[in-house]
Each structure stands twice: as C-alpha cells, then as structure tokens.
Image (tube, rainbow, N blue to C red):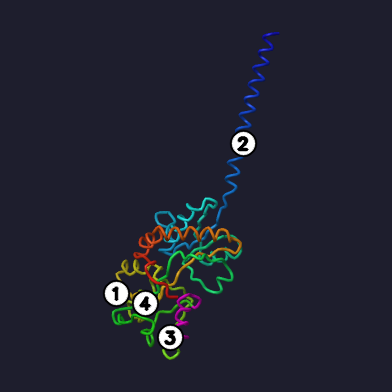
Amino acid sequence: MKKISAAVLVFILLFTLGACSNSSSGANQSSSSSKSSSVKTVQIAVPTAEKPLSYTENGKLTGYEVEILRKIDTKLKDYSFNIQSVSSNAQQIGLDTGKYDLIAEGFFKNSVREQKYLIPNESDGASLIKIYTNDANQSITNFSDLVGKKIAPVDANGGIYNILTAYNTQNPSKKIDIPTSDTGLSTADRLKEVAAGKYDASVLPSNLGEAQIIKQLNLKIHTSAPVKVIPTYFLLSKKNEKLKEAVDSALKQLKSDGTLSALSKKYYGEDVFQYKITN
C-alpha cells in the first residue's frame, strides 16, 4: 500500500506541475497576443518609380519619402507601417476606397485635397520650383522672363499648370503662354527637348531628380534659383485622425533633430529646408 501511495503522490505532483507550467505558458501567450493586437498596421502606398521620392534600387524600395516613413515608423510604437509601391492612379484610388491609410508622392496642399483627405500640419519636405533653360535662354531666371517664350508642355491637372495660371491671373498684362499635354512626357524627355532647342524653357519641381538626369545625360541645361518653394505633404484618409497626429509629432521631431535635412541632402543634393516658403 505504501508503494502504491507513493506512486499516486508522484503522479499527482507531476500533473500539478504540468498544469502550472501550461497555465504560465498560456498567460505569456495571452500577454504577447494582447501586445501584438494593440499595434495597428498602416497600409501605405508610394509611387513605383518616382526617383528620388520613391524607387527600387538593388531590389530594395528606397527614396526620400520612403526613408522618412521608415524613420516615422520607428518612432510610433502603436503603429507598424506596411509600405507598398504602386502606380500614381492606384495610390489615390486606394486611399479613396480605404485600401490605403496614407499615400506619399510629394503632394502639394490645395482646397480639394483638404476637403477629401487629412493632411498633416507638418510638411515632409519642399518642392523647389525651378526654370530649366538652354544656352540661348540662360538669362531666363523668373516667371516674367517666360513671357513670349516657348515653354515645354505641362500637365493640365498638375501643380505647375496651377502655379503658372496663378501667375497669369496676377499679371494680366504679362501672361505666359502655357501649353498643356496629356501624353505624360517624362522629366528626362522634357529636359532633352529644352537642351535641343525645341523649347526655350521648362518649369519643373526639383524633386523629380532633374539634377541627376542633367548630369547622367550630359545635357547643356541652365537651372535657375528656386522661383517658388512649396511644402509637400503626406495624404491620409479621413478615418485616421489619431495617425495624423502621431505623424505630425514624429515629423516635428525629425525636423528638429536634423534627420529630414540630412535625407534631403542625400536624395536631393541640397537641404530644401533652408529656403523660405513662398507659396
């Protein structure tokens, strides 16, 4: 009987220890699960090939805005960013339909976007509007110098068209002829046509990689100082008010500690934050 009792006691002891162990393990899993579920995944869309804003290099997605988003991600403990590269059209459609929470493509702030989306108070950078000319027109340095000149076509739905139209409205006696095109000419094509003399000048935002294109193609192009400095922003869906506040806080920190200036120098070749906003 003593032997049987001892065996029973051993069995009970092992069973009890095992139950405690399982209970402890279950508590850890519950804690871990609770922690994971508290982190919200943010679906983000960036352009597929919009160097230097967003592009793929050596199989890795990178670019000025991509790296800013990664820096923000490390600061926001309650969020996890899933950054995907898609076409520009897919970006805005996805934001409108709720597929994406945030999109980035060097967006300007305007009344239409302010009505449709949430826009952070803090900009993520600045678009430097510059005039690119050939040897025969290197004296062109501002908008008024474009009067009577042949400029490369601009997108009728784009920011440059709006900027030039605003200039004409303010200067009715000295209007610029603004040709438009829906063919989607690349930045490189526009600059090559200016260098070849087909056009006298082209007005472009400098965050499209013009400096690199001019250097790589060895184009004889003259670049003006910024004629306008326009802040750029991320766009968020209306349901993401808390995320917008968190992004604002992170952007403010990244500006203050010099991170954004360093990324600007790396991807643009200059610190866009040194210029005074003129829009």
* Residue highlighted by disc 1: 220
**Image quadrant containing the N terminus:** top right
**Residue 194 tag number:** none
Amino acid found under the numbered disc labelled 1 = Lys
- Nearer the observer: mark 1 or 3; the answer is 3
Instruction: Locate residue 217, reporting x and y percent.
Output: 32, 68
Q: Which residues are magenta?
A: 156-170
- Nearer the observer: mark 4 or 2; the answer is 2
Amino acid found under the numbered disc labelled 3 = Asp
* Residue highlighted by disc 2: 27
* Residue highlighted by disc 3: 177
* Residue highlighted by disc 4: 131
Instruction: Locate residue 13, reporting x and y percent.
Output: 64, 20
**Secondary structure under the numbered disc 2 in the rendered image:** helix
Q: Which of marks 3 and 1 precedes in the sequence?
A: 3
Residue 198 at least partly seen: no
